[in-house]
Amino acid sequence: MSRLQKIAAISICIALLVLALKMGAWWVTGSIALFSESTESLVNLASSLAAFFAVWLAFRPADNRHPFGFHKAELLSALFGGTLITLAAVMILREAAAGLFDPQPVTAMFQGLMLSGLGSIINGLWCYVLITEGRKLRSPALQADGRHLFSDVLFSAAVILGLVASSLTGWLILDPLIAGLVALNVLRTGLSVVLGAVRGLLDESLPERELENIRAVIHAEGGDGLRMQDLRTRHAGAATFIEFRLILPGGMTVATAHGLTQRITQALQSATPNTQVTIHIEADKGAAPPFSVIDGGRKDRA
């Protein structure tokens, strides 16, 4: 089992534990705000299950029917999780709206807040692990799960403070109002995750800073007298794909050209882990100008 799969498996166990704590908090208090938290925890569990399956699928080797592998499975998982988060926000908003017209007192406040607070502490520690490891492993599924948990922790703190204020002041309407705020935050998180997954599924190019790093690596290995054209890049889950045309002097031998492309490929893979590089070699029939980068009609002299 890979490190990514181990983290995804642990996420499921933690999501189950936190769900039990949050459900218990809602059960003993009857608070709509704590209901919103337990609904979020249920979504977290579903997202963790989807992330585990996606990570397992993404690490399967390519086959004849899937020659490019299963890397986009993580993006589909993030899309699924983001959709669930958005639907949960709609459910919480509905309950909050009903509570505004008929606010109810919250019972067993201390026990409920203790259970909810313990669950939030566990989430806070684990979301740090998910975000950190997700960035290292370039896993959108783990990063999406971590961002959602971080958002959950922040609003859990707001829920606890709001319920304490409601208990001290006797303002019952604070409970559904807090639930509504939680729902809006959940909605924002869900839409953000969905949009990020959609951008990945549509093969959005790497950020400009990463493109500049790629150009610099190619230039360092290729030197003057070479041209690189039609640079195309994309992320698919934890994998990065780089493709471009390399224009070589017409007199260069096949063995020399092969050695050059091997050095460039190894340098790119060292700079960006889990990268697949495709280089199309073409001969320059004319005199070779200084090395340059040409993307989509724009030419930047190195």
Image (cartoon, rainbow, N blue to C red):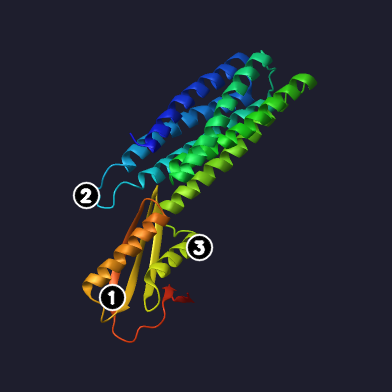
Amino acid at dot 3: Glu
Q: CA distance from mark 2 to mark 1?
A: 30 Å
Q: Is residue 284 left or right of residue 133?
A: left
Residue bearing mark 3: 208
Quadrant in the picture for residue 47: top left
Residue bearing mark 2: 65
Q: CA distance from mark 3 to mark 1?
A: 26 Å
Q: Assign a secondary structure to mark 1.
A: strand
Residue at coordinates 38% horizontally, 72% vertically from top-left?
A: 228
Q: Assign a secondary structure to mark 3.
A: helix
The earlier-in-sequence mark between 2 and 1 is 2
Q: Closer to the observer: label 2 or label 1?
A: 1
Image vertical order of residue 257 relative to residue 103, above or below: below
Instruction: Determine if residue 144 is in view.
Output: no
In this view, the residue farthest toward the right is: 169
Name the quarter where the N terminus is drawn: top left
The earlier-in-sequence mark between 2 and 3 is 2
Mark on residue 225? none
Quadrant in the picture for residue 232: bottom left
Quadrant in the picture for residue 91: top right
Image vertical order of residue 301 relative to residue 86, above or below: below
Q: Residue 234 in the image: x percent, y percent?
A: 40, 57
Q: CA distance from mark 2 to mark 3?
A: 33 Å
Residue bearing mark 1: 282
In this view, the residue farthest toward the left is: 64
* Residues packed near mark 1 inside 10 Å, few (<14), some (14 to 19) or many (20 plus): some
Amino acid at dot 2: Arg
